[in-house]
Amino acid sequence: MFIKKTAPIFGAVGLVFMRLFISSIILSLLFIRPKHFAIIRENIVPIFIVGATNVTIPFMFFALSAFYINAGSMAVVNGSTPLFAFLFSILLLGFAFRWIQFLGILTGIIGLCIFVGMDAMEFHPLANLSAVMGAMMYGVSMVYIFKLNFEDTKLMAAASMVAATICISPLLLFFPIPWNIVTGESMLHVVYLATFCTGLAYIPYFILIRNVGPVSTSIIAMLVPVFGMMWAYILLEEPITLLMSIGCLFIVIGILMTNVIGNKSENKPG
């Protein structure tokens, strides 16, 4: 929702830069100390790969798609991330193909489609393709992070966020932020995105990838609309429809199939 509100104001590049810049400052102050500089230098290439594939590139793809399709449509496309994580885990990590995980992912995606409603979804070929590419980059990056098996996940999250900020910075020369139309409200939205949806959210994200694997981590993102529905009901008194409830049920069943039943041996190559 906040991406949809801020992308037209800051532009795709400007929005990504602001999110990364603010979150990199927050994470650096919290988790990077002088003693970590040697570790960062030794792992500078993997850190920049993670920063680019897990943050900069997918953020750009989703920010671009936000110009043409609504938040519900992006949520459904983002729901394909577990499929890519599943595929690349098999191809790059040698994990075994598990039908229960595959069916759990499909069940979750079906739940997302029911939740959003096919009539509410927007289709724009390039925008949808851009969102799919973003989801694919998330899947690739999760597999790569898992393969790295970096011990200090907080340091990796902070360092990769700084690397991602550096990666996106040169593009501001060609796509500057139109500060003349930036409002106080839009800045608050960006600060919220940077702090809670980017910076602090990446700490448990990296921990989960290391502990339960890329597939089980990626499918948890499908809970976002479930919590969105709950908060909207509690704070905004928005009604919960029957279709939304059915969609939530499918999502929860899909997550249980993937994480409770299907991930028992996920961290072991097949």
Image (cartoon, rainbow, N blue to C red):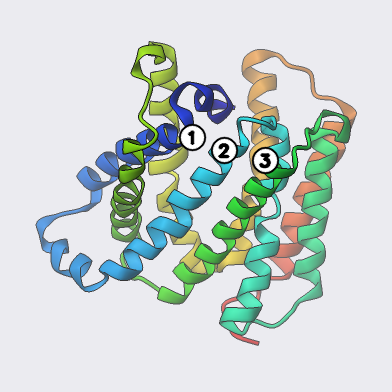
Q: Position of residue 77 (x, y in %)?
A: 71, 46
Answer with mark 3 or mark 2, whichever residue precedes in sequence: 2
- Callout 3–callout 2 Cβ contact below 8 Å: yes
Q: Which image quarter is the N terminus in? A: top right
Is residue 86 visible to the viewer in this orientation of the structure? yes
- Residue found at x 29% / y 45%: 27
- Callout 2–callout 1 Cβ contact below 8 Å: yes
Q: Position of residue 249 (x, y in %)?
A: 82, 44
Q: Is residue 200 above or below residue 216?
A: above
Residue 127: mark: 3
Q: Helix, strand or loop at disc 3? A: helix
Is residue 253 visible to the viewer in this orientation of the structure? no
Local packing at callout 2 (Cα closer than 10 Å; few below 14, some 14-19, many 20+) is many
- Residue found at x 31% / y 43%: 169
**Which residue is tagged 1?**
12
Q: Amino acid at mark 1?
A: Ala
Local packing at callout 3 (Cα closer than 10 Å; few below 14, some 14-19, many 20+) is many
**Which residue is tagged 2?**
64
Distance between the alpha carbons at the discs numbered 2 and 1: 6 Å
Q: Amino acid at mark 3?
A: Ala
